[in-house]
């Protein structure tokens, strides 16, 4: 698709990191306040930029999938519905496909 250039792949990974930072910011805002959300989003962006940079890693996609699964569970106040557990499980399963350490989050989701 992009020939020998990795620019397109790096841009897709950067977009995934930005989406993950947005999800983390939303989770922190939802749980605490807007300041916590802003700080969490900025720290997530800093960590993504500092540690992955030009490298192609699967950790960014694992973080995105786990954050998306947690966001699905926190979407509604109160006890999550059955379908939200199913969708969160799909996200954690996708995280496990990217890297097997994503399976460790199953214990946290089950608790």
Image: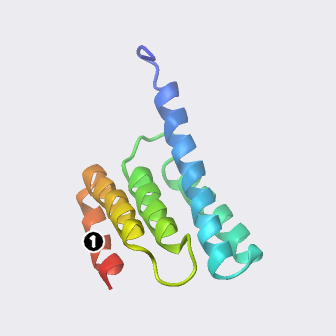
- Residue 14, by quadrant, is top right
55 left or right, relative to 28? left
- Element marked by disc 1: helix
Which percent across, then down, holds residue 8?
A: 51, 26
Above or below — where is 98 with respect to 3?
below
Q: Nearer the viewer, residue 78 or 14?
A: 78
Residue positioned most to the front = 82
Residue positioned most to the top = 3
38 left or right, relative to 14? right
Quadrant where the image shows the C terminus: bottom left
Instruction: Tell me if mark 1 has few (under 14), some (14-19) or many (20+) residues whose alpha carbon lies within 10 angstroms of its own.
Output: few
Which percent across, then down, holds residue 40?
A: 64, 69
104 left or right, relative to 21? left
Above or below — where is 37 with respect to 55?
below
**Residue at 27% in and 71% down:** 104
Specify how the rendered protein is coloured. rainbow
- Residue 103, by quadrant, is bottom left
Residue positioned most to the right = 35
**Residue at 49% in and 41% down:** 13
**Residue at 58% in and 80% down:** 77
**Residue at 46% in and 56% down:** 64
Above or below — where is 94 with respect to 24?
above
Which percent across, then down, holds residue 55?
A: 44, 41
Quadrant where the image shows the N terminus: top left
Which percent across, then down, holds residue 80?
A: 45, 77
47 left or right, relative to 101? right
Q: How many circles with numbers are drawn on the protein? A: 1
Residue at label 1?
Answer: 104
């Amino acid at each position: 698709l992009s020939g020998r250039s990795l620019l397109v792949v790096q841009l897709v990974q950067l977009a995934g990191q930005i989406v993950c930072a947005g999800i983390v910011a939303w989770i922190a805002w939802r749980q605490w306040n807007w300041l916590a959300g802003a700080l969490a989003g900025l720290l997530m962006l800093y960590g993504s930029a500092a540690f992955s940079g030009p490298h192609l890693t699967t950790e960014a996609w694992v973080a995105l999938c786990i954050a998306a699964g947690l966001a699905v569970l926190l979407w509604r106040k109160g006890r999550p519905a059955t379908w939200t557990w199913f969708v969160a499980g799909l996200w954690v399963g996708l995280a496990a496909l990217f890297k097997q350490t994503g399976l460790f989050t199953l214990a946290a989701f089950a608790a």
